[in-house]
Amino acid sequence: MAQQATPVRRARLGRALGPEPTAVSGVVLLLPGGEETSARRPSPMMATASVRALGRRLTRAGHAEGLVTHVVHYRFRGWNGSEAHLARDASWATDEVVRRYGDVPVCLAGVDMGARAALRAGGHTAVNSVLALAPWLPEEDVAAPPEPVKQLAGRRVLIVHGTNDERTDPELSFRLAARAKKANRDICRFEVHSDGHALHQHRSEVLALSEDFVMGSLFGRSLSRPLEDALAAPPPLGLRMPLASGFGKALRR
């Protein structure tokens, strides 16, 4: 009996969240969290849970301007060392966006290990911005090369991290941001004081900040004063910007 070939795993884009606009003028790719090492296929429901609220928020905010939002479904749950599977799948997804929609700006928006994938794949020519929420980053090792940042040059980057995050070290995201800021002034980082990894305690503020950043990056909307100040401030001020309680409720200036 002939042996069946093992099917090749492929990454894919989930269906567009919400009604797809008539003309697409910008795309957000949502990159869910993952694991450091795993060859298992991600569960579709678990994969979308971490980015669902963000996706809904951005879809509503940008639909009138032609925004379409997709979740990236990875081949594997794990980053898997030098294979960097999640980052490779993010790059593939950006290629797929170009194939489907043409020359439109793309924002990579990730959480946890997906945030690391967004930062790593941010050098794709179609990417104009990166949103990294509670990014999982490897511990620094003098024997290993540091997490790359040169690919972020020319992109607008926002990192958001809870100060009480016990899963991903907020100090590591600060150090990465500090290195990236040397070559790219359009990077800022907000600290959510007393919040943990999932950023549940101040979710409404985090979502409002994310919307503000993405709509400004993709469609040129004016940024709120805190974001403008964070981008303009020299390090470390613009990389340790506190996210104020109630952000998004006040009128924009």
Image (cartoon, grey):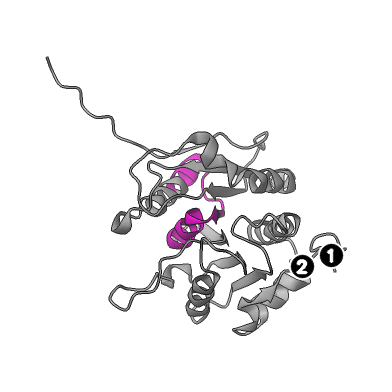
Specify the amino acid type for callout 2. Ser
Q: Position of residue 67 (x, y in %)?
A: 65, 46
Q: Position of residue 52 (x, y in %)?
A: 63, 43
Which disc, if any, is residue 221? none
Q: Is residue 60 left or right of residue 46?
A: right
Q: Secondary structure under badge 1?
A: loop
Report which quarter residue 248 is drawn in.
bottom right
Find the magenta span and give its range.
95-122
Q: Residue 15 is drawn in which quadrant?
A: top right
| Total tally of numbered discs in the picture | 2
Q: CA distance from mark 1 to mark 2?
A: 6 Å
What residue is at 82 percent from the left and 63 percent from the top? 246
Relative to 183, say whether 78 is above or below: above
Eyeballing the image, is 211 above or below 63?
below
Q: Position of residue 108 (x, y in %)?
A: 54, 55
**Magenta segment, prevailing SS (helix, strand or loop):** helix
Mark 1 lies on residue: 252
Say which residue appears at 35% left-offset and 46% top-offset. Answer: 38
Give the side of residue 170 with respect to residue 63, left or right. left
Q: What residue is drawn where x is 29% and y is 59%? A: 82
Give neighbour class at mark 1: few <14, some 14-19, many 20+ (Cα, 10 Å). Answer: few
- N-terminal-most mark, 1 or 2: 2
How far across and down, in percent of the image, does residue 160 sit?
Answer: 61, 65
Mark 2, residues whose alpha carbon is within 10 Å: few (<14), some, or many (≥20)? some
Residue visible at 52% across and 56% down?
112
**Quadrant location of the N terminus in the rendered image:** top left
Do the CB atoms of the residues marked 1 and 2 lie less than 8 Å apart? yes
Queried whether the magenta region covers residue 97, the answer comes back as yes
- On residue 224, the disc is 2
Q: Amino acid at mark 1?
A: Arg
Q: Nearer the viewer, residue 21 or 140?
A: 140
**SS of the residue under disc 2:** loop
